[in-house]
Amino acid sequence: MDRPHRITLRFLSEPNHAEHAGRVPGGVILRWIDQAGHTCAIGWTGEYCASKFVGGVHFLTPIHVGELIEIRAQVIRTDGADLTVAVDVYSGDPMANTMHRAGHCVCMYVARDERDQPRTVPPWKPGSPVEVALEQNAVRLAEFWVQLDQEMENRLKWLDEQRPSFVSRKVNA
């Protein structure tokens, strides 16, 4: 069975998506990104997938109430139980039929079995030069994320070692 490696979600931004100035905040856009990425990952794997990492989020232009939103998600790499998905956000005037890129990021998901253990995903192979470039970018990002994670763990370990000095101080009431 051939599974889709990309999806597109389309909808209008609504007043409940926006803050008081009529702009959609980044947190709402992040939710849309994760929903599209997650839907794409599940569509490819046919399995439950958990979010592992969302990185390099760029908000390029504001999104306003009443705009047509288009979220494009596509698999750009598989590796064991990991699945990397590129997500692009477009918005525009639905009456003028014009869209512009409003944001993008890369998400990683992990396929999980019924016992919540990692499960190997079906391999994805790039089919065009653009997909080859996206896969190469995903490999570089994965290497960067490992380094970033190691640095963060070292920093958190250092902070944990400093905590006794903060806890042992007496506060005068």
Image (cartoon, helix red, strand yellow):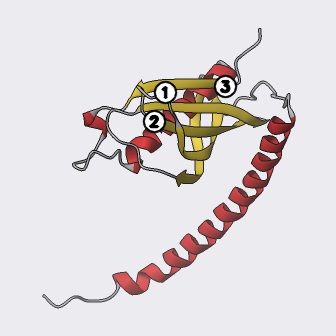
- Residue bearing mark 3: 6
- Residue sitting farthest toward the left: 173
In the rendered image, is residue 116 in sight?
no
Residue 92, disc? 2
Disc 2 to disc 3, C-alpha distance: 21 Å
Instruction: State the residue in front, 123 or 14.
Output: 14
Question: Distance between the Cα atoms at labels 1 and 3?
Answer: 22 Å
> Which badge, 1 or 3, comes first in the chain's sequence?
3
Q: Residue at x 77, y 56 (%)?
A: 143
136 relative to 43, above or below: below
Q: Earlier in the sequence, mark 2 or mark 3?
A: 3
Helix, strand or loop at disc 1? loop
Give the number of the mark in front: 2 or 3: 2
Res 2 → quadrant: top right
Q: Earlier in the sequence, mark 1 or mark 2?
A: 2
Q: Which residue is mark 1?
A: 97
Q: Which amino acid is tagged 2?
A: Gly
| Residues at marks 1 and 2 touching, judged by CB atoms closer than 8 Å | yes
Q: Residues within 10 Å of mark 3 (few under 14, many from 20)?
A: many
Which mark is in front, 1 or 2?
Answer: 1
From the top left corner, tell me how far across and down residue 154 is, in percent.
Answer: 63, 72
Which residue is at the front of the view, 50 or 38?
38
Quadrant of the drawing holding the N terminus: top right
Label count reads 3
Whole-percent x, y for residue 39 in the image: 56, 25
Q: Residue at x 39, y 34 (%)?
A: 67
